[in-house]
Amino acid sequence: MDNKNVIKTTENQAAGVFIATLNQIRADHLNQDLFRVEADFKEACAELNEGWDSIRKVITTNRGGETGMHGFIGERAQVFISNAKKAIVAA
């Protein structure tokens, strides 16, 4: 093998190592982002479940009576949906 082939082979190997390193960095970043998305999704689901429980409590306790219950339900729904949205959008 002459010097030109050795240099070309070394350049190709260096380029391959560089590309492999960049791909690993990208894969690591993607993995971190997916972990955050999953955590945010779980937080949002927990917030919505808590909202459902709160609304059920309003219904079972008859809070607000026949004419005011919808306001209490609406307020709780708005708060918990807003909190769930913040958990996802903030990411």
Image (cartoon, helix red, strand yellow):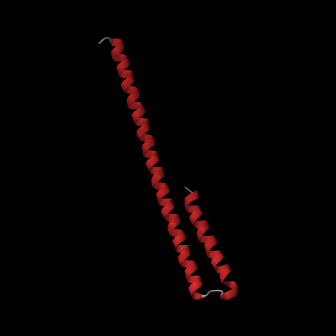
State whether residue 45 is above or below residue 37: below
The structure residue drawn at horizontal position 65% and vertical position 80%, both measured from the top left corner, is 72
The structure residue drawn at horizontal position 55% and vertical position 59%, both measured from the top left corner, is 88
Query: Which residue is at the far left?
Result: 1
Where is residue 3, by image quadrant? top left
Left or right: 22, with 77 as reference point: left
Left or right: 59, with 6 as reference point: right
Specify the quadrant that holds the C terminus. bottom right
Specify the quadrant that holds the N terminus. top left
Query: Which residue is at the far right?
Result: 67
The structure residue drawn at horizontal position 48% and vertical position 50%, both measured from the top left corner, is 33
The structure residue drawn at horizontal position 58% and vertical position 78%, both measured from the top left corner, is 55
Q: Position of residue 71 (x, y in %)?
A: 68, 79
Q: Position of residue 6 (x, y in %)?
A: 33, 16
Q: Position of residue 5 (x, y in %)?
A: 34, 15
Q: Position of residue 24 (x, y in %)?
A: 41, 40
Count of all numbered marks drawn on residues in the image: 0
State whether residue 67 is above or below residue 87: below
